[in-house]
Image (cartoon, grey):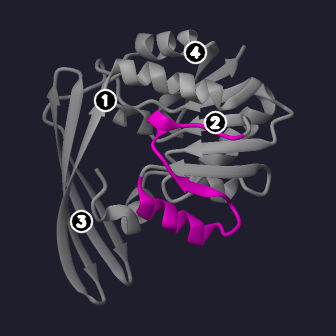
Amino acid sequence: MFNKSQAFYEAINARGKDYAAEAAWLRAAIGVANPGAHRVLDVACGTGAHLRFMHKQFEVAGEDADATMIEIAKERLPGVPFRVGRMQDLTVERPYDVAMCLFGSIAYLADETELRSTIVRFANAVTTGGLVIIEPWIGPDEWHDGTLEASFVDQPQLKIARIGASERYGTTSVTRYEYLVGETAGMSGFSETHVQQLFTDAQYRSAFDAAGLKPRSERSDLFPHGLYIAAKQ
């Protein structure tokens, strides 16, 4: 999955993603759905970009399967508990008021069976009345074959060109990225391959129902594929 791009992750996404605005939207949504929420867990937290704008309002923690991402998050937010772990194996010592998984990270699961078992783990990680917030990725009906994309970073000390080409194999998408990075220390290039599942709305809702969660869908320009906000019964 992530090979060498962790250090450039936010620089690449900054052109089309407003972490501060997304975090503000989430804070407001949590306040409406669970006014007493105090503890928030971000699963697949990456470099902690959302938690940077939430840790003053909540007691936050983060978990990600990528150890390099976690090291960056720890440097950014000293004192916030971060740990390396897969969402498929999620366990907590004390339930949170909110467990969230953003930016389509849920799509890195292997199949619907793993989706269902992982959503159960999310449900077990929150209190009764707590929230599980999932930002899905592209659904199968939204998929366009042969998609070619390009992202560019043009900072004084950092230049990046990333080109991605996507393919579909049944309900699995494969995106192959090529990076060219220019830094003051020199030029480098590397490749990454991301494999994600094209889960349907019905599959997500079935997984929520099986885990004892009552989901509702939210739409916002900040989250182009929407959000599921599911309350634990």
Q: Amino acid at mark 4?
A: Ala
Measuring from the top left, give residue 3's x and y in whole percent.
Answer: 27, 60
Please say whether residue 77 is visible from this viewpoint.
yes
**What is the secondary structure assignment of the residue under circle 4?**
loop
Q: Is residue 188 above or below residue 117?
A: below
Rendered image: mark on residue 110? 1
- Of badges 3 and 2, the one in the foreground is 2
Q: Earlier in the sequence, mark 1 or mark 2?
A: 2
Q: Amino acid at mark 2?
A: Ala
Q: Which residue is mark 2?
A: 99
Q: Which residue is mark 3?
A: 161
> Counting other residues with Cα less than 10 Å from the Cα at mark 4, is it few (<14), some (14-19), or many (20 or more)?
many
Relative placement, left or right, of 189 versus 71 is left
Residue at mark 3 to residue at mark 2: CA–CA distance: 34 Å
Measuring from the top left, give residue 95's x and y in whole percent.
Answer: 72, 35
Quadrant housing residue 202? top left
Seen from this angle, which residue lies furthest bottom? 185
For the record, the magenta segment spans: 66-93
- The C terminus: image quadrant: top right
Quadrant housing residue 232? top right
**What is the secondary structure assignment of the residue under circle 2?**
strand
Q: Residue at x 49, y 45 (%)?
A: 44
Q: Earlier in the sequence, mark 4 or mark 1?
A: 1
